[in-house]
Image (cartoon, rainbow, N blue to C red):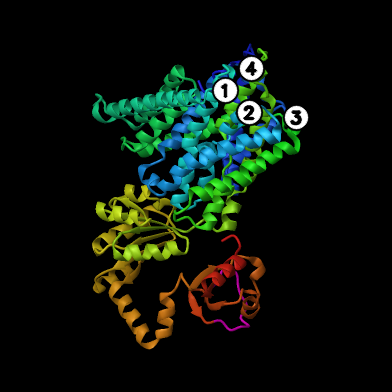
């Protein structure tokens, strides 16, 4: 199993069952508290989980130690990792993989190779360990993993293509890191030095995992979609069977080849997540709840094993390894992998500085460290303390700084876009998407025409095939998190139904519809729906070109050379300032052109005092407006 060697951790439990039960309850309570605090402060839960583990571990209150769970830790961590990896891979939909396929492939191939080689060399020369121990450190620190990436993306809603690349990298590298580390450890222990042996062993373990995962997915799919039970399949039965299938796949694969279980559950998760299982939404909700519990338990339990003494012994050399891993190798491999993709510089920097390590490195490093400390012949590898200390140091620093400050990093780099859902991928929908994405918004198009969807994807847009009048389709496309939903089809009846669903079922801040037949405009507006009449808009544009040609041409350049942005005043320090004072502080090339107060628009007098809740419209050059918005509201 994943932690097959961890049976040597601690001592078997004796008659202290009630105490252990209380400790388990305490850990689960801390896990729930960490989730609540994460939601409250909008930071990833892993930060609070790590801190809670250290607090109750030997370095804190000494409630949780290596002896607490004894041999049970093997099973607990093994099953927990299976559930966590399965849950993460289940969410990796084919549509999401298509968002940035080239970047994702390069991250898990070229990027992983750069990380492995670079970290190995850094560990060798900075820590002075044998090449074998350095290679173990390098292999383990390849993994980011869904255990750390998913909580971050929960509170940092970046563009779909960024999320897809990070999630794919996390899941695939979790698998490759666990298998690669196991292969290196086994061959080092047996003193094999032929490079071909490493490759063969890696392929065997990966193949075993993929085969078992594939078989499990096919069996579950057949049972749930082709076999009619007397009482029918209920959501509860489907959820339990899916979860049980993941654990069974993990156990069987690991019984055949150690560490292949991670590949098995990852394979099964990806396949089952894309096979349209019955009650799929219920499965995702159930697995999400279970994952929160096991994630909390494993992170706290493993964090409790951190020994500050081992970290201190690494000294400046250990911190230099962290710097190489997080600030040298990570940015290099990200910028190389994202070359040619439609990632902004800010998004590349975000991916570079948000790559914390998680459960797989921690758990596998712990088991290897124990084995390396076990009395053995002189020929066996040594350096268990350095291995565990280095891996835990990288995990601790990257989780605290990259995970804990992920939202702040995203805000600083301005990579948290407004999520916009556009129903209808025709000429209007496509042109609107181009304009919104040009200024960094996260846009998802829903379109029924399969050929049009493929065309949009080829152009780099995020397009989903489906019916925009279906609530499930809207929810899957992200309507629940959308700030703006736009009905842009050429059929007014469809647009009306879309906007009614969006208004009644989802909490979008703004719902807008395209009106194709001018006589329908009043009917839409009577329902409280914001409308854009295609006929009126065209006439207005022509009139502007006749009467205001300069303004018309400038408006056509919006998002390229010029820009107009509106922002609400929520910073108390701006209240009672005058328009004149604010304009003087803004960057050159822009100004406050309009003030909206109580839904009334006015060109503001320079001596007008700003009030809390006012909406200011900033006009000017694109870069100047962007800088002004950041200055007025740094965390918008």
**Crowd rating for badge 4 (residues with CA inside 10 Å; few <14, some 14–19, many 20+):** few
CA separation, marks 3 and 2? 24 Å
Q: Which residue: 59% across, 28% down?
A: 136
Of badges 4 and 3, nearer the viewer stands: 4
Q: Which residue is mark 3?
A: 309
CA separation, marks 2 and 4? 13 Å
Q: Which residue: 38% across, 37% down?
A: 282
- Secondary structure of residue under mark 1: helix
Which of the labelled discs sits on residue 185, or is there none? 1
The quadrant holding residue 355 is top right
CB-based contact (under 8 Å), mark 2 and mark 4: no
Query: Is residue 59 positioned above or below 16 on the image?
Result: below
First in sequence: mark 1 vs mark 3: 1
Query: Is residue 16 positioned above or below 61 on the image?
Result: above
Residue 341 x %, y % = 44, 53
Number of callouts in the render?
4
- Secondary structure of residue under mark 4: loop
Q: Which residue is mark 4?
A: 380
Membership of 606 in magenta stretch: yes
CA separation, marks 1 and 4? 10 Å
First in sequence: mark 2 vs mark 4: 2
The magenta span reads: 604-615
CA separation, marks 2 and 1? 12 Å
Query: Is residue 21 positioned above or below 619 on the image?
Result: above
Residue 6 x %, y % = 59, 19
**128 or 10, which lies in front?**
128
First in sequence: mark 3 vs mark 2: 2
Q: Quadrant of the C terminus?
A: bottom right
Which of the labelled discs sits on residue 131, or is there none? 2
């Amino acid at each position: 199993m994943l932690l097959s060697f961890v049976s040597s951790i601690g001592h078997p439990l004796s008659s202290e069952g009630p105490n252990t039960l209380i400790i388990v309850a305490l850990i689960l309570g801390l896990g729930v508290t960490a989730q609540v605090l994460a939601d409250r402060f909008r930071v990833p839960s892993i930060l609070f989980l790590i801190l809670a583990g250290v607090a109750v571990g030997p370095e804190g209150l000494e409630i949780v130690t290596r002896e607490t769970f004894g041999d049970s830790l093997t099973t607990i961590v093994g099953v927990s990792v299976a559930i966590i990896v399965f849950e993460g891979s289940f969410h990796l939909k084919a549509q999401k993989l298509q968002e940035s396929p080239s970047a994702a492939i390069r991250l898990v191939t070229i990027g992983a190779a750069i990380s492995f080689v670079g970290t190995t060399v850094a560990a060798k020369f900075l820590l002075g360990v044998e090449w074998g121990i350095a290679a173990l450190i390098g292999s383990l620190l390849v993994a980011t993993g869904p255990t750390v990436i998913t909580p971050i993306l929960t509170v940092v809603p970046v563009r779909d293509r960024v999320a897809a690349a990070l999630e794919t990298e996390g899941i695939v590298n979790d698998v490759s890191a666990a298998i690669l580390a196991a292969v290196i450890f086994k061959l080092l222990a047996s003193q094999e030095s032929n490079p071909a042996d490493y490759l063969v062993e890696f392929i065997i373990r990966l193949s075993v995992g993929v085969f078992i995962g594939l078989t499990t997915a096919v069996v579950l799919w057949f049972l749930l979609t082709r076999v009619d039970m007397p009482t029918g399949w209920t959501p509860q039965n489907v959820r339990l069977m899916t979860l049980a299938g993941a654990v069974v796949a993990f156990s069987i694969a690991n019984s055949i080849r150690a560490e292949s279980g991670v590949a098995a559950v990852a394979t099964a998760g990806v396949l089952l997540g894309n096979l349209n299982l019955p009650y799929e939404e219920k499965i995702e909700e159930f697995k999400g709840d279970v994952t929160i519990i096991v994630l909390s338990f494993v992170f706290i339990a493993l964090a409790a094993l951190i020994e500050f003494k081992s970290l201190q012994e690494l000294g400046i050399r250990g911190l230099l390894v962290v710097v190489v891993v997080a600030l040298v190798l990570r940015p290099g491999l990200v910028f190389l992998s994202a070359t040619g993709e439609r990632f902004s510089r800010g998004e590349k920097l975000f991916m570079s500085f948000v790559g914390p390590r998680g459960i797989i490195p921690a758990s596998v490093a712990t088991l290897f460290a124990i084995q390396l400390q076990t009395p053995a012949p002189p020929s066996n590898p040594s350096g268990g303390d350095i291995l565990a200390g280095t891996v835990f140091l990288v995990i601790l620093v990257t989780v605290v700084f990259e995970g804990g400050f992920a939202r702040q990093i995203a805000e600083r780099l301005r990579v948290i876009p407004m999520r916009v859902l556009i129903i209808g991928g025709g000429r209007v929908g496509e042109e609107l998407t181009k304009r919104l994405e040009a200024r960094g918004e996260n846009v998802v198009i829903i379109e029924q025409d399969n050929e049009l969807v493929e065309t949009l994807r080829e152009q780099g847009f995020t397009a989903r095939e489906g019916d925009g009048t279906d609530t499930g389709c809207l929810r899957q496309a992200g309507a629940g998190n959308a700030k703006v939903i736009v009905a842009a089809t050429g059929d007014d009846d469809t647009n009306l139904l879309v906007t009614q669903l969006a208004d009644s079922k989802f909490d979008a801040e703004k719902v807008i519809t395209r009106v194709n037949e001018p006589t329908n405009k009043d009917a839409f507006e009577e329902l409280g729906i914001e409308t854009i009449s295609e006929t009126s808009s065209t006439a207005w544009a022509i009139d502007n070109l006749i009467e205001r040609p300069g303004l018309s041409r400038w408006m056509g350049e919006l998002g390229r050379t010029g820009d107009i942005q509106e922002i609400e005043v929520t910073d108390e320090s701006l209240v009672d300032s005058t328009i004149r004072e604010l304009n003087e502080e803004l960057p050159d090339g822009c100004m406050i052109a309009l003030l909206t107060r109580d839904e009334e628009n006015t060109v503001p007098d320079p001596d007008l005092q700003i009030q809390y809740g006012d909406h200011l419209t900033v006009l000017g050059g694109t870069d100047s407006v962007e800088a002004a918005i950041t200055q007025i509201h740094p965390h918008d």
